[in-house]
Amino acid sequence: MMHAAYPNQAKPKSARFSRKAISSVTFYVGLLLILGVICFPFLWMILASLKTQVQIMSMDQLFVFSPILNNYQTVFGQYEFVKPIMNSLIIGVASTLLAILLGLPAAYAISRYKQNMLGLIILMVRFIPGITFLIPWYIIFSKMGLVDTHFALSLSHLLINLPFIIWIMIPYFDSLPKELEEAAIVDGSSIVGLFLRIIVPLSVPGIITASLLSFIFSWNNLVFSMALAGGKTQTLPLAIFNFISYAAIDWGALMAAAVLITIPILILSLTSQRFIMQGLTAGAVKG
């Protein structure tokens, strides 16, 4: 009789709690499955770097094995991995600094003078595959005698980093209030002084984001190094090929090298995550 008298009576709290608990458990189980799929290759890479060749090929020793550090000793002893690390670091820092120096003024000009078509053209250049520029780039640098130099590789990476930085910074500059610039001009500031003293300090999160992502591209780039690098300027992605021969692959040393390449970028990304999120979402919500 009670149910018939009140057909719209609310469900008991226990039923609502049970449904909420099931929903939460389902969400976290799904999240763990996704994280497991994403993180397993990275975990396997770390574990393989601590195994012998026989242990790597044995599924029985996937997680239970006696770890060794011989692979890391081989990477630095036999393959001289320090030199590629320094080359990648020099090229990444140089190309990123050049892209920042050239890209910030360009992005600010496009933002303030509403050069939307120019910004679209720059974005289209960024979408062009790097391999398209490879043959002309090689011909130019070979004629100038610049093949196998840090300068040539830095300029080749700049070709991709510069449009990327410009495109990231345009919406960031759009999000800055124009009243600050107007007040600075009224106070007698020049355009250059306004840009250096006000705009650049306010844009630090966006600059950090663009710099980090550009450096990561240079650190991981292989295409330009295959054509323009040599014995003097061999970078980390190119050095990976040293572990692959016609007869066999040194999986342990290869995984150790992969860990050494990945860990610095991973640490850099995690420690700068706040700036990356703030920089990428700049301009998304404008009043």
Image (cartoon, rainbow, N blue to C red):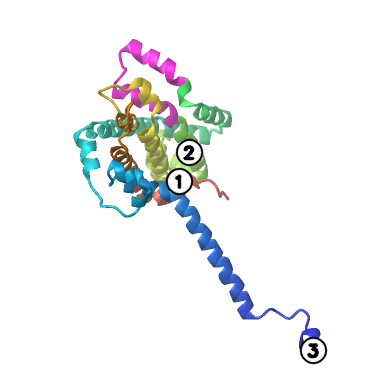
Task: Compare marks 1 and 2 and give the one earlier in the sequence.
Answer: 2
Specify the quadrant of the image occupied by residue 242. Answer: top left
Q: Which residue is mark 3?
A: 1
Q: Circle 1 — which element? A: helix
Image side of residue 15 versus residue 9, left or right: left
Reply above or below: 77 against 274: above
Report the residue marked by disc 1.
Answer: 279
- What is the x, y in percent for residue 259? 32, 43
Tell me if mark 1 has few (under 14), some (14-19) or many (20+) residues whose alpha carbon lies within 10 angstroms of its own. many
Q: Nearer the viewer, residue 115 or 43?
A: 43
Q: Residue furthest bottom?
A: 1
Q: Are marks 1 and 2 in contact (CB under 8 Å)?
A: yes
Q: Nearer the viewer, residue 273 or 60?
A: 60
The tag earlier along the polypeptide, 1 or 3, is: 3
SS class, disc 3: loop
Residue 223 falls within the magenta-colored stretch: no
Extreme top residue here? 143
Quarter holding residue 76: top left
Residue 124 falls left or right of residue 260: right
Q: Disc 3 to disc 2, how far (Cα)?
A: 66 Å
Q: Nearer the viewer, mark 1 or mark 3?
A: 3
Q: Which residue is mark 2?
A: 168
Q: Residues within 10 Å of mark 3 (few under 14, many from 20)?
A: few
State the SS at label 2. Answer: helix
Which amino acid type is shown beneath numbered disc 1? Answer: Gly
Q: Earlier in the sequence, mark 3 or mark 2?
A: 3
Seen at 53% across and 31% down, the residue is 123
Q: CA distance from mark 1 to mark 3?
A: 62 Å
Q: Is residue 268 visible?
A: no
